[in-house]
Image (cartoon, rainbow, N blue to C red):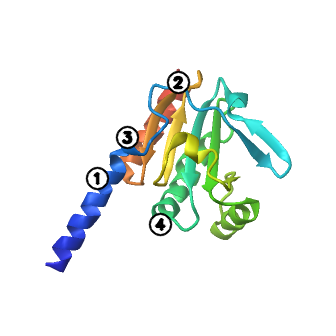
Amino acid sequence: MKYFATLFLIAAIGLQMRAQDSFTLAKINSTAPAFSFESSPGSSQQLSDFKGKVVLITFFATWCGPCRAELPHVEKDIYKKYSDNPNFKLLIFGREHDWETVNKFKKDQGFTMPFYPDPERKIFSLYASQNIPRNFVIDKKGNIVYASVGFNEEDFTKLKAEIEKQLKL
């Protein structure tokens, strides 16, 4: 009986995570919220700097199990595939993390893709109120064309397909 109760709870949480509308503030078919971020210690960039490119924004935390499951796929299936594409930009933000934390995580996990801090949730709070990992694909015109929360293979396949589709436009 405990097994079924646990299974039901996991399924209910999964459904809640996929029903992103209640916590997702930046909606599909809307303009992506503008922000600036520290691209390296002491230097900053703005989302608008990437207009004309397809942008994937990923929010994660080092303690988040689903985030830790998703990030190796982001590295292998997205970053390594598109990092040399001048029409693509990957922005991975560590929610509530500083430079020291994201750099240590990157090194400890053996990642080569860039990570950026969002120590006070300033960027995250423009896009969602809770739940990670989160992904937003922004088209070349600056509109959100895909959003997901949580991690599962089906949604990740859709994410990759949307990036590919947007790069062909």
Under mark 2, the amino acid is: Lys
Q: Secondary structure at mark 1?
A: helix
- The reply to whether discs 1 and 3 touch (Cβ–Cβ < 8 Å) is no
Amino acid type shown at disc 3? Asp
Q: Could you tell me which residue is drawn at 76 percent across and 37 percent down?
A: 45
Q: Which residue is mark 2?
A: 168
| Whether label 2 touches label 4, CB < 8 Å | no
Give the Cα separation between the discs numbered 1 and 2.
32 Å
* Mark before the other along the chain sequence, 3 or 2: 3
The structure residue drawn at horizontal position 43% and vertical position 44%, both measured from the top left corner, is 148
Q: Earlier in the sequence, mark 4 or mark 3?
A: 3
Q: x, y (%) of residue 56?
A: 57, 39
Q: Is residue 107 above or below residue 22?
A: below
Compare residues 162 and 130 and report the one nearer the observer: 130
Image coordinates for residue 31, horizontal then vertical, percent: 54, 25
Within-10-Å neighbours for mark 2: few <14, some 14–19, many 20+: few
Q: Earlier in the sequence, mark 2 or mark 4?
A: 4
> What residue sits right under mark 3 in the picture?
21
Q: Do tag 4 and tag 3 residues touch (Cβ < 8 Å)?
A: no
Q: What residue type is disc 4 on?
A: Gly
Image quadrant where one finds the N terminus: bottom left
Q: What residue type is disc 1 on?
A: Leu
Determine the secondary structure under disc 3.
helix
Residue 65 — which label?
A: 4
- In this rendering, the answer to whether 48 lies above or below 116 is above
